[in-house]
Image (spheres, rainbow, N blue to C red):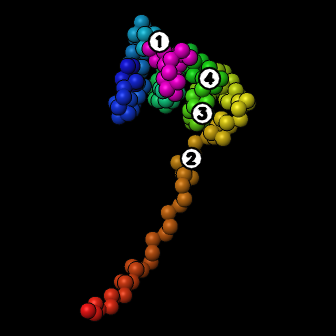
């Protein structure tokens, strides 16, 4: 988990992509490993730490909930309540990071009472600065503009250049 704090962005991104598989693997035994890993992940949500850690926790939870084979009960019990608490974080950047991503979480996570409450808190944010970011992600079918149709005929060649005169 310390690699999630690395100075190199590529290291942090690669580590983040590995977290869902790690959590899935340790949760298969339902033992101390799962508790230890979730505790380490939860440490990123603590208010006493740097705000960047709390933003990273948002990304961790997003990655873990997107995993098809994740232990939903474990995530809902051990990670989502800490994620929901970030809706009232004193740092605006943390609240915005959560607002940008929360509606893209899968339905099972959004139906958790803690996340339902977090969405309400973000919608009622006293600063009024998180609401513009609280939008569902665009549908992949409707993202961007449709491609223009291909031309029927190839474009005509450009006219020749005039001769150079000295």
Magenta span includes 94: no
Q: Which mark is residue 28?
A: none
> Which stretch appears magenta?
40-55
Select label 1 or label 3 by which is in front: 3
Residue ID for mark 2: 139
Q: Earlier in the sequence, mark 1 or mark 3?
A: 1
In the displayed structure image, the side of residue 46 where residue 9 appears, left or right: left
Q: Are marks 3 and 4 in contact (CB under 8 Å)?
A: no
Q: Mark 3, residues whose alpha carbon is within 10 Å: few (<14), some, or many (≥20)?
A: many
In this view, the mark in front (4 or 2):
4
Q: Nearer the viewer, mark 2 or mark 1?
A: 1
Element at label 1:
helix
Furthest-top residue in view? 32
Mark identifier at residue 89: 4
Whole-angstrom CA distance, mark 3 to mark 4, is: 10 Å
Q: In the rendered image of this protein, does residue 22 appear above or below residue 154?
A: above
Whole-percent x, y for residue 86 in the image: 60, 23
Where does label 3 land, which residue? 96
Real-space Cα separation, disc 4 to disc 1, in angstroms: 20 Å
Residue at image position (56%, 17%) is 47
Question: Image quadrant of residue 27?
Answer: top left
Q: Nearer the viewer, mark 4 or mark 1?
A: 4
Mark toward the start of the polypeptide (4 vs 1): 1
- Magenta highlight on residue 43: yes
- Secondary structure of the residue carrying tag 4 is loop
Q: Residues within 10 Å of mark 2 (few under 14, many from 20)?
A: few
Residue 86 visible: yes
Residue 57 visible in the snapshot: no
Q: Which residue is mark 1?
A: 39
What residue is shown at x 70% (from left), y 32% (from top)? 127
Helix, strand or loop under label 3 = helix
């Amino acid at each position: 988990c310390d690699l999630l704090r690395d100075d190199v962005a590529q290291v942090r991104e690669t580590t983040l992509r590995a977290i869902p598989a790690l959590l899935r693997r340790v949760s298969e035994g339902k033992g101390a490993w799962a508790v230890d890993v979730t505790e380490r992940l939860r440490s990123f949500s603590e208010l006493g730490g740097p705000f960047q850690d709390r933003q990273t926790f948002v990304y961790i939870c997003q990655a873990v909930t997107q995993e098809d084979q994740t232990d939903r009960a474990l995530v809902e019990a051990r990670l989502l309540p800490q994620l929901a608490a970030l809706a009232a974080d004193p740092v605006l950047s943390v609240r915005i990071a959560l607002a940008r991503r929360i509606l893209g979480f899968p339905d099972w996570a959004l139906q958790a009472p803690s996340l339902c409450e977090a969405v309400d808190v973000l919608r009622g944010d006293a600063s009024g600065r998180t609401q513009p970011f609280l939008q569902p992600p665009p549908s992949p079918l409707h993202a961007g503009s449709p491609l223009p149709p291909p031309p029927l005929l190839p474009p005509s060649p450009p006219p020749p250049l005039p001769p150079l005169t000295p």
